[in-house]
Amino acid sequence: MRNCYIVDDDDAARTSLLTLLSARFRIVVQGFTSGDAFLRGVGDLDPGVVLLDYSMPGRNGIEVLRLLKDRHPQMVPIMLTGKGSTQAAVEAMKAGALDFLEKPSDPETLFGVIEAAFDRSGEILRSAQAAKSAAQRLARLSPQEANVLRGLVDGKRNKIIAYELGLSPRTVEIYRANVMSKLGVNSLSEALRIAYAGGWLAVERAGPA
């Protein structure tokens, strides 16, 4: 079941959106009276789309956007505002909003943006699942097998990996075969895709502090 969260301190606006979306989509819709109230409970919520008001007491929409981007990437936010401006739209998009709409929004435009947000939410969920699966498979490798795979991720040949690890090329070949077997793949490209999905490329690029 898809989930949508409406965060708006305006009772009438929030109720109107709840009614509108419940009639159009087969989704679970929940309302929150402020950004602070939403943030207090977001850790217990299922991934979904967030319709977020720009101006609210306490943390405003931009502050909520930034926190969602950093801590809850499984939420896909859409910014809504009663007073739109180019500057506000740019600020919202930089802070992580998928889109920026003025209130009241044309229903069909709003529905289209929400569908796009649900598509994005699905992509995020699939990516997270792939990363989790990859991490589990990579955890099966011994430390030395992992070192060999890291060398392959860096594009190094067996002889170079052997030299750097103080091993014979034949031993590296054995470790490489073990990597393929433990990851359940038949080609180097498949092994590399798992390493990338598990975040190894990002780690290697970051390098030592």
Image: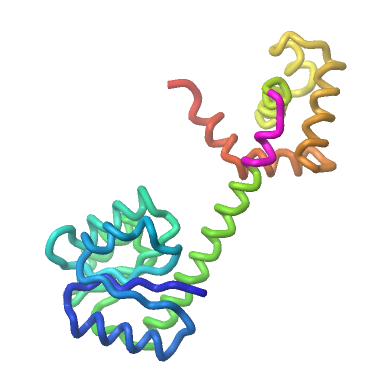
Question: What quarter of the picture does the C terminus occupy?
Answer: top left
Task: Judge by depth and name the residue closer to the eye, 11 or 169.
Answer: 11
Q: Is residue 90 something one can see in this rendering?
A: no
Asked if residue 35 lies in the magenta stretch, the reply is: no
Quarter holding residue 140:
top right
Q: Is residue 70 above or below residue 92?
A: above
Identified at 21% across, 67% down, the residue is 54
Residue 23 drawn at (x, y percent): 41, 91
Q: Is residue 92 left or right of residue 49?
A: left
Q: Which residues are magenta?
A: 135-142
In percent of width and height, residue 107 lies at 35, 88
Q: Nearer the viewer, residue 13 or 108?
A: 13
Residue at 69%, 44% in the rendered image:
193
Is residue 126 found left or right of 52 in the rendered image? right
Give the residue displayed 62% in from the left and 51% down from the top.
Answer: 130
On screen, 163 above or below 37? above
Q: Is residue 148 visible?
A: yes
Residue 188 falls left or right of residue 81: right
Residue 141 counted in the magenta span = yes
Q: Position of residue 157 (x, y in %)?
A: 77, 23
Q: Residue furthest bottom?
A: 23
Q: Is residue 183 above or below residue 63?
A: above
Q: Residue at position x 41%, y 61% from top?
A: 75
Q: Position of residue 189 (x, y in %)?
A: 76, 41
